[in-house]
Image (cartoon, rainbow, N blue to C red):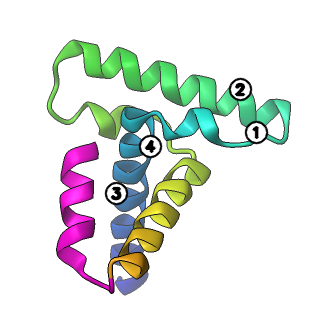
Amino acid sequence: MQELHTLKREAVTNIALQAVCLEAGVDQFLLKTSDLTKANHVVAKASYKATKAIGDKNFWKAIPCEKELADAVEAIFGAVYLDCGMDFDVVLKLFRRLH
């Protein structure tokens, strides 16, 4: 049961971080190393734009999750956290600004 809870928490986190990545345009700066990765990013971005256009507040939950998009944003947040002297409020403000 604990593993299921952990998996769900991680999936929701990755989906939310991917939405931040797409909303902020960070995805355009990522090196896409294979045609499959490029295609997956295109599908994720198209799904993101289409579901957002509908106006549903939870639009970001409907897009396919590409973990490397979430990882990119997580790395940015980690770098900001370290750079600002481990002040979580700074990271939280950045998250709210980007999302």
Q: Secondary structure at mark 2?
A: helix
Q: Indicate which disc residue 32 carries.
A: 1
Q: Secondary structure at mark 1?
A: loop
For the residue pair 14 and 9, the one nearer the viewer reads as 14
- For label 2, the residue is 39
Q: Of the residues shown, which amino acid type is indicated by label 2? A: Ala
- Label 2: how many residues lie within 10 Å, few (<14), some (14-19) or many (20+)? few
Residue beneath the point at 17% across and 73% down: 89
Q: Of the residues shown, which amino acid type is indicated by label 4? A: Cys
- Label 1: how many residues lie within 10 Å, few (<14), some (14-19) or many (20+)? some
2 or 4: mark nearer the eye: 4
Find out whether the residues at labels 2 and 4 contact each other: C-beta distance under 8 Å: no
Query: Is residue 99 among what the camera can see?
Result: no
**Sequence order check, earlier mark of 2 and 3:** 3
Answer with left or right where residue 54 lies relative to residue 17. Answer: left
Q: Of the residues shown, which amino acid type is indicated by label 1? A: Lys
Quadrant of the rendered structure where residue 85 is? bottom left
- For label 4, the residue is 21
Find out whether the residues at labels 2 and 1 contact each other: C-beta distance under 8 Å: no
Q: CA distance from mark 1 to mark 4?
A: 15 Å
Q: CA distance from mark 2 to mark 1?
A: 9 Å
